[in-house]
Amino acid sequence: MRHQSSGHCPACGGVHAAEACPTARGSRPAPPADLALIDNLVAANRILAHQQVVDGFGHVSVRHDKDRSRFLLSRSMAPALVTTEDILEFDFDGNAILPNGPAAYLERFIHAEIYRRRPDVNAIVHSHSPAVIPFTVTPVPLRALYHVSSFLGSGLPVFDIRDVAGDTDMLIRNSGLGAALATSLADKPAALMRGHGSVAVGSTLQLAVFYAIYLETNARMQAGALRLGPITYLTDKEAALSTETTNNQATRAWDLWKLQVSKSS
């Protein structure tokens, strides 16, 4: 994680530059995040790229393990290239705790506003995975057609930025838009974003990554199945029972994905 070095800060006594002091900015300092959490966040970036859920764009964050009012997110860069040195810390207003650092993602407000409204969420993935996009611009709902993607249930909310801001560049570039997206997401595990992509959330980093990957997988399979004929989707009860099972086994897939990216790096 990037740090700014200097002498003792006159505002809080910490060892950092005065202009970088979170206390001086009205925010109390937090203990450093666990190194294992940062390593897993780096791995999550690499996994999502390896699984072709993100490319040069998209991002994944995790809630700070020592301060639940903060989250960790990489600086603005391609996810496959993220290292531990690229991880930054943010508050729920989308402010970097250490200012004047590297450029942050424009859409960090997605993460900030969902964390603010969803205490059950500890990790978030935003992606533009290609198979999902058609389901954001057509009336066909993205639904669970097999057990591994059962978290989709009978469909997901679709956020249309025009409903709150008219014509835009489609980016969630401020707190107001982030709040509108978070409201559309409600208590669901994922939401689609018209003409843009999706957001997936989880109680753990491993689960959020799992959801993002199988969101894309189900979209590919559903598009293919629709060309063959009518689909028999999971019932609501089947989806609920399957989700309970697969949520408890998400780390099984995570261990494989993490091994694959460690071998390729």
Image (cartoon, helix red, strand yellow):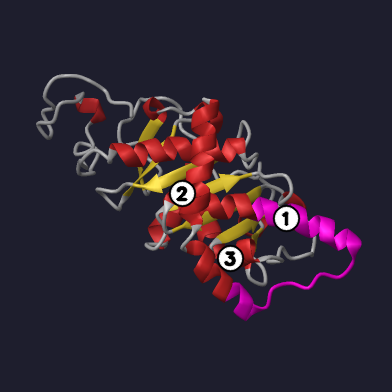
Specify whether residue 141 is painted magenta: no
Q: Is residue 175 visible?
A: no
Observer-side mark, 3 or 2, equals: 3
> Which SS type dominates the magenta stretch?
helix
**Viewport quadrant of the N terminus:** top left
Where does the magenta region start and end? Answer: 215-240
User: From the viewer's perspective, is residue 72 above or below residue 218?
Assistant: above
User: From the viewer's perspective, is residue 87 above or below residue 246?
Assistant: above
User: Marks 3 and 1: CB-CB under 8 Å?
Assistant: no
User: From the viewer's perspective, is residue 75 above or below residue 249?
Assistant: above
Q: Residue at x 58, y 65 (%)?
A: 151
Task: Work out which residue is located at the far bottom of the displayed protein and give it.
Answer: 237
Task: In the rendered structure, find residue 111 and report the number of the disc placed on it.
Answer: 2
- Expressed as whole percent of the image width and height from the top left, the position of residue 119 reads 37, 62
Upstream in sequence: badge 3 or badge 2: 2
Quickly name the residue at label 1: 219
**Callout 1: helix, strand or loop?**
helix
The amino acid on which the numbered mark 2 sits, given as a three-letter code, is: His
Circle 2: is it few (<14), some (14-19), or many (20+) Cα within 10 Å? many
Observer-nearest of 131 and 167: 131
How much space separates mark 3 and mark 1, taking CA atoms?
13 Å
Q: For this view, does 228 lie left or right of residue 161?
A: right
Task: In the rendered structure, find residue 151 and report the number of the disc placed on it.
Answer: 3
Specify whether residue 227 is painted magenta: yes
Observer-nearest of 162 and 160: 160
Upstream in sequence: badge 3 or badge 1: 3
Observer-side mark, 2 or 1, equals: 1
How much space separates mark 2 and mark 1, taking CA atoms?
23 Å
